[in-house]
Amino acid sequence: MADVRIVESEAELFERAAAFVRDHAQKAVDDKRACSVALSGGSTPRQLFELLVSEPWRSTMPWRQMHVFWGDERCVPPDHQDSNYRMARQAMLDHVSIPPVQVHRMAGEHADPAAAAAEYEGDLKSYFDAHGAAPRFDLVLLGMGDDGHTASLFPGTFALAVNDRWVTHNYVEKLSTYRITFTYTLLNAAAAVLFMTAGQNKATALREVLEGESAPLIFPSQGVKPVNGTLTWLIDRAAAQQLSHGPAA
Ligand code: 6PG
């Protein structure tokens, strides 16, 4: 069952998200001296990253124990303006003290996206093996597109059916491009997943994802259902306006 939290404004959404990230990170570090987090791209996550490097979050986050991964990447070099790695680096990673060896980017520049996905799966395996643990992220941060996609799991695409890999390439016809993305298998193994959704343009897809018939091939965010973890949605008033229990207009 998802924990759906509707807040008044985008500003409140990011404050709540920052507290969520800090609290989950600190708990993971208290329990096992490390926190694995998977980041996403998009403008909503970027605003969270920018907030996390300001006080009081900056000095209360256990940055040195964070192990940072990406839930998806665009097939571009790391200094490209579309790179999710570049975005996170500029908004957050360049401003905090995470040891560089603990930052694991996807090789979006690889000529063969399938090979890049396989390599990233290898990185993940090494990380989780070294920590003596199953592939289970402490925290996965996700945004949702206005078509209901999340990570790079787009409607009707190949990756939605991949269940024997943790990471896969995915051709996204509507963008005429490949992406690299976590599969549902890996997302749904997480200990905690946080979706952040803001803005009126997300309202229709959000209603379908949270209250519509089960149709993950059409609204892929529906397929994110941690098997043995928590699922939290933080939604602002504008995105929640079509929900039956959303705020009054
Ligand atoms: C990406 C993503 C993607 C994103 C959503 C929401 O690489 O684009 O990881 O899943 O999070 O599209 O993006 P916005 O917050 O910009 O709407």
Image (cartoon, helix red, strand yellow):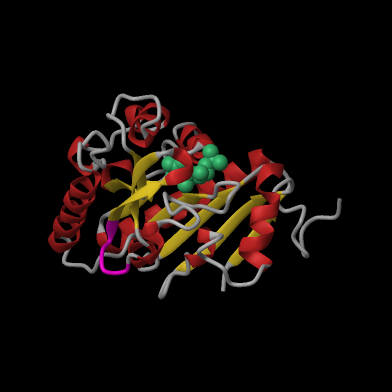
Q: Position of residue 158 (x, y in %)?
A: 37, 58
Q: In this picture, is 42 found above or below 223?
A: above
92 to the left or right of 66: right
Q: Residue 88 location, x and y as percent?
A: 38, 34
Judging depth in this view, the residue of 31 and 247 nearest the camera is 247
Q: Is residue 93 above or below residue 167?
A: above
Name the residue at 61% across, 62% down: 209
Q: Is residue 186 visible?
A: yes
Say whether residue 39 is magenta: no
Image quarter for residue 137? bottom left
Quadrant where the N terminus sits is: bottom right
Instruction: Decide whether residue 166 is among the magenta residues.
Output: yes
Residue in the foreground of this view, choosing between 70 and 110 = 110
Q: Residue furthest right?
A: 249
Task: Estimate the x, y position of residue 210 in percent, counting from the top left.
Answer: 63, 65
Q: Residue at x 34, y 55 (%)?
A: 182
Q: Which residues are magenta?
A: 163-167
Q: How many marks?
A: 0
**Residue 44 in sight:** no
Horizontal relation, residue 172 to residue 196: left or right: left
Magenta stretch: helix, strand or loop mostly:
loop
Position in image of residue 30 (x %, y %): 32, 59
Q: Residue at x 26, y 62 (%)?
A: 32
